[in-house]
Amino acid sequence: MLKLKPEEINVGSLIRKTEENFTLVECFNPETNTCPLIGHCGLERVLGEALFAYINVLDQYTLADVTPGYRIQALDHTQDN
């Protein structure tokens, strides 16, 4: 069981807490980067922006927003009282 209601769980926060690694490409990790294009490629910046945009979009939604039928079930329970 969840400790919070689905409408209280932010999808972006959930993803950040459950994903171990957001290293989309090798150059995101300076400790293990062996890419020969380092310093000559703009892909790291572009993919960094894309990752930031991805997380920002997820931050706009709760678990209730992305769970099919949740809102209908919640409405049914409130009508029972």
Image (cartoon, grey):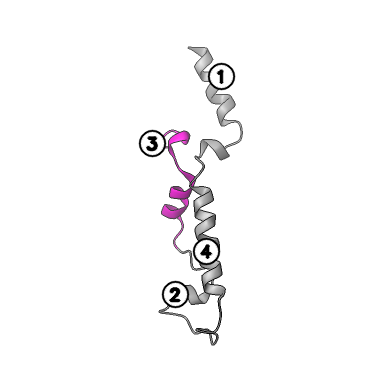
Mark 2 secondary-structure assignment? loop
Q: CA distance from mark 2 to mark 1?
A: 48 Å
Q: Nearer the viewer, mark 3 or mark 4?
A: 4
Query: Measured from the top left, where is residue 37 in percent x and y?
Result: 55, 85
Q: Amino acid at mark 4?
A: Glu
- The residue that mark 3 highlights is 3
For residue 49, above or below residue 18: below
Pointer 2 and pointer 1: residues touching (CB < 8 Å)? no
Mark toward the start of the polypeptide (2 vs 1): 2
- The residue that mark 4 highlights is 49
Q: CA distance from mark 2 to mark 4?
A: 16 Å
Mark toward the start of the polypeptide (2 vs 4): 2
Q: Amino acid at mark 3?
A: Lys
Pointer 2 and pointer 3: residues touching (CB < 8 Å)? no
Q: CA distance from mark 1 to mark 4?
A: 41 Å
Mark toward the start of the polypeptide (3 vs 4): 3
Q: Nearer the viewer, mark 2 or mark 1?
A: 2
Determine if residue 1 is in view. Answer: no
- The residue that mark 2 highlights is 29
Q: Nearer the viewer, mark 1 or mark 4?
A: 4
Q: Amino acid at mark 2?
A: Asn
Query: Measured from the top left, where is residue 50 in percent x and y?
Result: 55, 62
For residue 3, above or below residue 39: above
